Image (cartoon, rainbow, N blue to C red):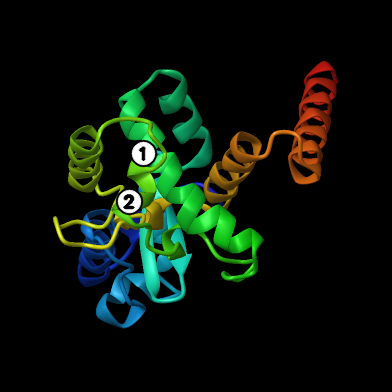
Amino acid sequence: MSDGVPALETLPHELRLAVRRAVAAVEEADQPVPVAMYRGLAPDLRPYVEAMLAAAGRVLIELREGFISGYDDAVARELAREGIGALEPIDAAVLALVLLHGFVIPKAQGELPRTARAYQARRVSFETLVNSRIRSREQIRLSLQRLRDRGLLQPGDSAPIRPGPQFLRLTPQASNLIEENLILLADPDGALADAIRRRRAQARSQAIEGEKR
């Protein structure tokens, strides 16, 4: 394995099983997996778990409650470019409204910590979505169900309208990107949006310069 991690086959059989079980757990879980539940998530075996995930374009994401897996940022960008996993326009609009009213606005108003991520968003009322007038009540209701089925909203017909378990699988960079895109959408002429555009333009320029060297 890369980055100085010995091959998994060098471990005793019992530890190899522990690593594989930990990988399966973080890939299948809807919530962060506590370290105490799986031997493979202990610090000495964690690099093996990370290496196995990396071979599949995945990364190990550490949260306060434990670990879960998600796509590597570069892999996620490539999947997005190819349109894999893309949402229907109405579903994307509904999800954007949920994030805007439940996460971006409360965070901007100091109701959420500055370090908060999307999965910590506040609940949004159904009427807030209806009042946006993007679609009819029934179309929005059907959209919410599709988003719940994909784990993008909390599951269950009576569950609060909040980001679902898939948002736990976002890397910090991916979570920040979503927040910035929503700021650009909600307040394109604001000072924060201007700062985001300047920073992105500078990053692109640096990347181009780096490719020329």
How far apart marks 1 and 2 lie (CA) works out to 12 Å
Task: Judge from the rendering whether residue 66 lies leftward or rightward of residue 174; answer left or right.
Answer: left
Say which quarter of the image contains residue 158: bottom left
Task: Judge from the rendering whether residue 200 lies leftward or rightward of residue 168; answer left or right.
Answer: right
Q: Secondary structure at mark 1?
A: helix
The location of residue 124, given as percent across then percent down, is 38, 57
Q: Does 211 appear above or below 191?
A: above
Which residue in the rendered view is the most extreme toward the left?
157
Give residue 94's mark. 1
Q: Residue at x 79, y 28 (%)?
A: 201
Give residue 127's mark. 2
Q: In which quadrant will I find the C terminus?
A: top right
Q: Does 86 appear above or below 154?
A: above
Task: Judge from the rendering whether residue 47 lies leftward or rightward of residue 196; answer left or right.
Answer: left
Give residue 138's mark. none
Q: Could you tell me if residue 86 is visible in this image?
A: no
Identify the amino acid type marked 1.
Val
Q: Does 165 appear above or below 81?
A: below
